[in-house]
Image (cartoon, grey):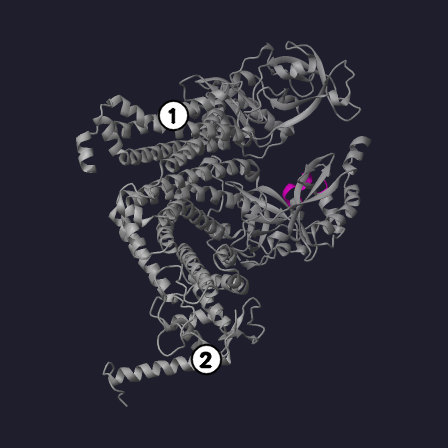
Amino acid sequence: MPRTTDVDDVPPLKPMEFHILLVLLERDVHGYALVKQLEERMPEGGRILPGALYRSLNRMADEGLVEESDWRPDPTLDDERRRYFKITDLGRNVARAEAERMESLVRESRAKKLLAPRSS
Amino acid sequence: MVYRLLYRLLLPAFPAAIRHRHGEDMAQLFADRCREARRGVSAPRGILRVAGLSLLAVRDALGQGLAARMGASTTRGSAGAEPADGRGGSLPVGGGAPNPAPRRPATSYLADLAYDLRYTIRDLLTSRSFPSVAVGSLAIGIGASTAIFTLVNALILRPLPVAAPHELVQLTTVDTGITTQNLTNPQWEALRDRGADEFDGLFAVGTRYFRVGDEEDPIRTRGLLVSGSLFSTLGLQPAVGRLIEAGDDVRGCPGIAVLDHGYWQSRYGGDPAVVGRTIRLRGHPFEIVGVAPQTFHGLTVEAVDSIYAPICSEAVLNGESSILDARRTWAFRAVGRLRQGTGMPEARAQLDALGPAVLADAVPLNYGAESRAEYLSGRFEMAPFATGFSSLRDQYERPLMVLLGAVTVVMLIVCSNLANLLLARTARRRPEIAMRVALGAGHGRLLRQFLTESLLLAGAGALGGVAVAFGISRGLVSLIAPADGSLALDLSLDLRVLGFTTAAALAAGLLFGIGPALHAARTDPNATMRGRAGGGAPSWRRGGSLVAAQVGMSLVLLSGAALLVGTFWRLETLDPGFARDRVLLLDVEIRDPLEPEPLRQTFVDLTDRLRAVPGVEAASYAELTPISGNAISEFVVPTGYESLLDEDVEVLVHRVGEDYFAAIGSPLLFGREFSDDDVEGSEPVAILSESAARGLFGEADVVGRRFHRRMSDTEVGEPILVVGVARDAVYRSLREQDTATAYFALRQQPARFFGGTVTYHVLPVPGAAPLPGLQAAAEDVAGNVRMSASPLSAQLSASLARERLLATISAAFGLLALFLAVLGLYGVMSFNVVRRFPEIGVRLALGSSVGAVFGLVLRQAAWPVAAGLGLGALGTAGAAGTVESLVYGVDPYDARILVGCAVVLALAATASAALPARRAARLDPLVVLRRDE
């Protein structure tokens, strides 16, 4: 799979992928922790299963948005079987581009009175 | 571990790239989720949650796997290619670059799943009978499989609840090709003291029944004598106090005891202050030092050991008759834990090196040269011990495997029935499917829709099955439990059982769903929408071949059931050589301490009193009762015959009282019964069974002849006079009818042969109820007695538990299979008749007679049934070998049984095909032809 290096070459992010990048911006995490954080962002009762998560991660890794992390927690807490993921520079840029895109959409929505003007 | 294994089964759904890169992580994530689902809730609730999660994971894996594969293929293909699902790709949103390979967002699959589920449930709810038939039959099939697997799991698969059970091995000795499970205490001590360093600990245990409590009212309680290393080797921690340690197990030790957790709860109310208190075992005070952990109940799968005491304290229990130095009492089993990193070969090599010295240290003292050489030629062997001891396992392993095979066949029949029903449903839904295809639904989409339906049905069936299994497995246990109910099998639903149920449900869902789903996905909308007969209707051939398969499998099950029911019936009704339904067994225990001689006299006096009780025809006593599971055998030689060793006759030895044969309702063929003159010191006499007489002397009437016991390789005992010849009777097992038996007079044996308890055999006058009289007589003669009575027939019946289990379950399976096969044929024929309405209408309009139409339909049914019977006959012949060792009195290759079952099946099949045939023959051609216009 060819790796893209430019933000513009990356197809638009799916909501789940964007959320994954947002979680990884905070710290490197393993699959289970990622799922727990993603589920906190979902409506009550939402559940993410291994197939959905790792298909997304696989695709994002192919596109160079995430990669395996060398970071390990304190050895007493570590479980060797777990693999940690981190966001790449490209991932960071793509996330930013996505956020900007959303911001422009929000701005447009306000202009068209779809949303109330910002109260502050 | 199990969760990870379960998820690995799903990994093939994903493309290799994902599988290799993330497979282990995915399995780990699934395991994490399962553990989370079970956290903080009760076990059954946790298991239900895990089951739900597993079903979701299956759906997730199938959906995501398929999506990933499709994503991969479209990316590899030319830009702009249509995605395989035919619904068009999602539009790029916002300001991204043009999307070279449009992918469906993951949410769309979730939406599809939600849609599929909603659609399936709505659709199933419109038909009342189909979902209830499907879920009901799946619940029965999955429930029966799970129940049998629960038993297999409890008895054969579940490891002991100790640290790393797979490192444990049992040590046995083998000499002259015979494996001995037990060691003598001198052998065990020699082995222990030589220090086998390839083992991380060795221990020995011996099962004992202790009389616990005060002298007035002791309770017989099962316990273990254990070496000091038992608990440490197993890695167990006490619940209270401490466990038995190496320092406790030294010769001359005082009596100490560790209690089982359940025993501690029930007898002491879980009081931690029990430590330091005294418990009386066989009247001797033992100090309680602690309580074993809650999960550990000893090393025998089907029993609970309530009390543990160190082996050395056996001397406290038995005093002068202690077996600690007995070199011919094989009373202990030894188990070792392989050192980490040590394989079986290293451990075996060490045992081979230590073995000769260990055995030499413990040679039985009175062995002759040959016996000694044979003994010393022995060596130690090892066998895996992860699952503990079980006598039931040896007895039931094969029957359970046979039943597991049978229930698999039942499941296959259930699946083929459901496949047939689904095929018919698919045919009815053809116009709707064609419409969906025409509107752009792809093969994959339809396939998933149909698989959702079958997996949903299978999931519901599995839930019902768990409930069914709960009931059936307890029923099964009651079939194999001894009369006193002392069977403590742990039938809890663990992960292994859950995994089995999930796998069975998945396999069933795919098995009965995939055919109809593929069939539906191939629907040609053009043909279907143009004409009723268009492409995609399931062919008669397919339905017919499923019926043939069902009939074949049913025949195998029915024939098997006939053999096993026949076996049970033969054994239930055979003449055991005594009055099986009349004899009453009376266990009388004299509880006043008496010296052996007065004790013997009391028992003999009691016999006379029992005979005098009104309603008693005859009464006697014996050392053992028939079919009690115990037997003693000896080699004997006729007098005046210089036999070679290998020409000795082996006889079962049975020591009995005066008039014993009258008391069991089996008059002698020749000679006399033992009498009051046959006492210790008088000329030794014996009564031989007819087989023993013929074996020893070549004829039946051998009264007056003499024979000897073989004492050693070169010596024989004093001559024994044959005073009578008895009918052959069963002794050890109902299956052994003509075993050579030598009966000796119990009163000619030393007085110690009469223990505290004697079993009287009483033959009541038909219709009499002499029990109160017997009780009064016993109390009158012996004072403080405990008496319990049971019919001999109950003992015989209990000995047939295995046969009863096999007969009951196989008969149930056979009938279920017959019912399902008939139902399947009925379904296919009905469907087929409806399909042929136009053709039949034309035939009738052209003058075909009602009989001809009836025959037409029946002939069509005859082919799959005949083919099925042929296949079934082959299958039955193939399967005969697997039940050969389980049957008795019937020949598994007997063609009459096969033909009988085939006739039953054929008749049932004809009846089930006759209903649709009658419907066809009663058609009004005008109505049919008009409808077809």
Q: Is residue B316 magenta?
A: yes
Circle 2 residue: A7
Crowd class of label 1 (few under 14; some 14 to 19; many from 20; radius 10 Å): many
Of helix, strand and loop, which mostly describes the magenta segment? Answer: helix
Asked whether the viewer can see residue B87, the reply is yes
Whole-percent x, y for residue B317 in the image: 63, 43
* CA gap, disc 1 and disc 2: 73 Å
The one of A105 and B840 positioned closer to us in this rendering: B840
- Can you say whether A88 is above or below B169 in the image? below
Determine whether the residue tagged by mark 2 lies in a helix, strand or loop: helix
Q: Name the chain under label 1.
A: B
Frontmost of labels 1 and 2 is 2
Quadrant in which residue B318 is drawn: top right
Give the amino acid at mark 1.
Answer: Ala
Is residue B358 found inside the magenta-colored segment of the image?
A: no
Q: Which residue is mark 1?
A: B906
Q: Quadrant of the C terminus of chain B?
A: top left
Chain on which label 2 sits: A
Residue farthest along the bottom direction in this orientation: A120
Residue B857, picture quadrant = top left
Q: Which one is nearer the viewer's eye here, B927 or A75?
A: B927
Q: Which residues are magenta?
A: B315-325
The extreme right residue here reads B369
Up the image or down, B485 lies above or below B890; here it is below
Disc 2 residue type (three-letter): Val
Depth check: give the residue in front, B761 or A110: A110
**Is residue B162 left or right of B771 when viewed as pictured?**
right
Residue A28 appears in the picture as rendered: no
Percent x, y of residue B68: 45, 62
- The picture places residue B745, in percent across and down from the top left corner, at 63, 20
Is disc 1 placed on a helix, strand or loop? helix
